[in-house]
Amino acid sequence: MSRRREIARRLEALSDIAGIMSAMKGLALMEVRILSDFLVSQHQMVAGIEAAAADFLVSHREFASADEPGEELYILIGSEQGFCGDFNEALLSRMELLCQQKSAPLRWLVVGRRLASRIGERDCVELALPGATVADEVPAVLLRLTKELSHLLAQPVLAGFGLSALYHCSATNEIRLRRLLPIRDLPPPERSFPYPAELNLPPESFLRGLTGHYLHAVLNEVLYSSLMAENRQRQVHMDSALQRLDEDSARLKLTYNIQRQEEITEEIEVILLSADMLDEVKHGG
């Protein structure tokens, strides 16, 4: 009886775990739907700013430097919470690969405490910030990130550094290395104009303001994209875990039934044995 009770307790525990995982899967699905709308509008905004920057640089080629920045500060965007498979491990592997490929030491700003805990304390990590767990937290994360970036890039030791982001891209389902500043890798202008656009600001001021708007918009898109990819991976991870739980529960139920059948058989044998003994007593009497 104790063996069957132990199996019953394990089945109940598996049922509770399955309920929690199903709830997590449902929350991830809900976040994916919310983030889908955010990403569409954010992508359109970034595309519009990039088109404006491309048109501006065609007319003001003195600001379109062909030289790449000598060194880069990389924003590495991971997860704030777990249960998302190898989401952080894949980023960590790509980070290690980049560090091996570059001759100069790279500088990193890590977003996501779950990923930061995996990286640990390293000289190349300038700062680690908490990430977003849901879409509503992205604006606060973005505000904190841009504030810290302005402080870091103002330091003499990071003067002249470019800025790039390494993250899971929801559009390609792959890890993407995206170069952010200075503004580069722009799509070619869709059309050419015989005269440069008339600006209400000096070109330097216009480019400075455009760069600020671009950085804010593209970082927003990057954070939303990473969170979307994380929740998609969490759905897959929960599906796989629920399938394994179902398999374990099925095996335990089979064992429970076998155990119950054995107990019933033993009870029947005891009853029959008692009946035989009673008959012997009666006949003997």
Image (cartoon, rainbow, N blue to C red):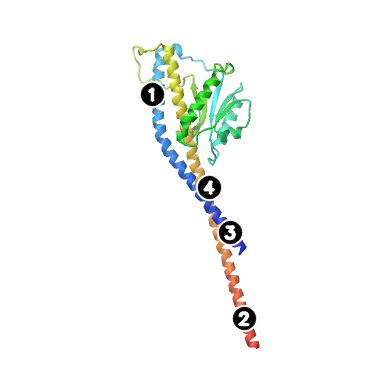
Q: Earlier in the sequence, mark 2 or mark 3?
A: 3
**Disc 4 residue type (three-letter):** Ala
Q: Callout 3: helix, strand or loop?
A: helix
**Within the image, what quadrant is residue 10 found in?**
bottom right
Question: What residue sits right under mark 2 in the picture?
Answer: 276
Mark linked to residue 48 = 1
Q: Callout 2: helix, strand or loop?
A: helix
| Separation of residues labelled 1 and 4 (CA atoms) | 41 Å
Question: What residue sits right under mark 3 in the picture?
Answer: 7
| Separation of residues labelled 2 and 3 (CA atoms) | 34 Å
Give residue 254's position: percent from left, percent from top: 55, 60
Between 71 and 126, the one nearer to me in the picture: 126
Residue at 51% over, 27% down: 144
- Residue contact at pointers 4 and 3, CB within 8 angstroms: no
Q: Earlier in the sequence, mark 1 or mark 2?
A: 1
Residue at 58% over, 73% down: 268
**Is the residue 136 above or below the residue 55 in the image?**
below
**Quarter of the image with the C terminus in it:** bottom right
| Separation of residues labelled 2 and 4 (CA atoms) | 52 Å
Mark linked to residue 241 = 4
Q: Earlier in the sequence, mark 3 or mark 1?
A: 3
Q: Earlier in the sequence, mark 4 or mark 3?
A: 3
**Is the residue 135 above or below the residue 8 in the image?**
above
